[in-house]
Amino acid sequence: MPRVGIVTDSTCDMTPADLESAGVRMVPLKVLIGEETFLDWVEMAPDEFYRRLKTATVLPKTSQPTPAEFLAVYRELAESGCEGIVSIHLSAQLSGTISSATIAAADSPVPVHVIDTKKVSQAVALVVKAACEARDSGLDADAVAARALAVADSTRLFFVLDTLDYLVKGGRAGKAQGLAASLLNIKPVLDVNADGIIEPFKKAKGRKRALAELAAHVAEDSRSRGRLRVALLHACSSDEARDLQAELVAHGTDMEFAGTGLVGSVVGTYAGPEAVGCAYYPLG
């Protein structure tokens, strides 16, 4: 059976324990808070990050891994017997992480397929988990990469933010830059589109209505695209994640629920506290 290494970055927002259990290597991004630098998910847990974010006077910054950090992992996997590697990452429109991975891949001792999921957070996690399923079924690196690409291409990601301030100040607002979301309690449902760019999807009056609009859309997608594998995400707003799950059920979504994950410090730098969302792809 060919041995396939799977690599991702910390913006998949899978816990270190879950990554280890799945046999996935993670290369962390970094979050900079004042003069301090922390490895995302390794040295900075979400709960601590959001506690500090709410009182921060200056927005934290983030930085991508270096090519050398990726190359070290690729070499370790090759030395352990991997014949090929599938490296799965967040949208190139949101970070230069995939550029570092691509540079490192050129010097890897074994072939590396670098996958731009054009998504982030639990949407990336869904692709990683699908790649693991393909690897564990005995497929080679080419086939695992093809499966990862297919899932990435069919995955949708929608989310609701408490405020757009973090996205705008962090320069990641994309096509949502011009929304006057603070007016009249308007809460936009945002989408990461097929190009990996954040854009407005719908506007709603208040967060409760925004979550209901999001759930209604996912339910409609399940009727047109078939049964969905669904993962929820939240930035320390577990009650609203449960509300979103209840809305999905109430709207009759045909789904396989893949769980709920926290948004880590790097993604949270731009999403801000209280973000909640949904990632999914059709199982057919």
Image: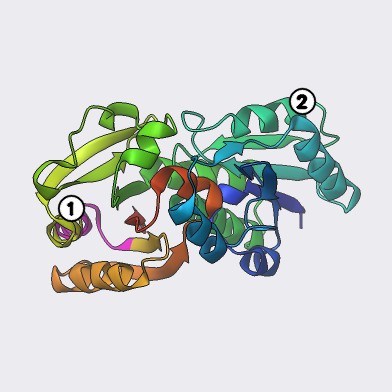
Indicate the position of residue 258 as horizontal and vertical percent values. Answer: 42, 68
Q: Is 67 left or right of 131, judged from the image as shown?
A: right
Q: Residues within 10 Å of mark 2 (few under 14, many from 20)?
A: few
Q: CA distance from mark 2 to mark 1?
A: 41 Å
Query: Which amino acid type corresponds to the residue marked 2 in the rendered image?
Result: Ala
Asked whether 137 falls inside the magenta stretch, the response is no
Residue 122, relative to residue 119: is it above or below?
below
* Residue 113: quadrant of the picture: top right
Q: Residues within 10 Å of mark 1 (few under 14, many from 20)?
A: few
Disc 2: which residue: 106
Disc 1: which residue: 224
> Nearest the camera: 69 or 112?
69
Tag 2 and tag 1, C-beta contact below 8 Å: no
Dot 1 lies on which element?
Answer: helix
Quick one: quadrant of the N terminus?
A: bottom right
Residue 238, relative to residue 129: is it above or below?
below
Give the residues in magenta: 215-228
Residue 64, relative to residue 15: is it above or below?
above
Identify which residue is drawn at 21% across, 66% down.
Answer: 253
Query: Which amino acid type corresponds to the residue marked 1 in the rendered image?
Result: Ser
Indicate the position of residue 276 as horizontal and vertical percent values. Answer: 33, 58
Residue 219, relative to residue 74: is it above or below?
below
Residue depth check, mark 2 versus mark 1: number of the one nearer the observer: 2
Dot 2 lies on which element?
Answer: loop
Q: Is 223 left or right of 17, judged from the image as shown?
A: left
Answer with mark 2 or mark 1, whichever residue precedes in sequence: 2
Indicate the position of residue 161 as horizontal and vertical percent values. Answer: 30, 50
Quick one: quadrant of the C terminus?
A: bottom left
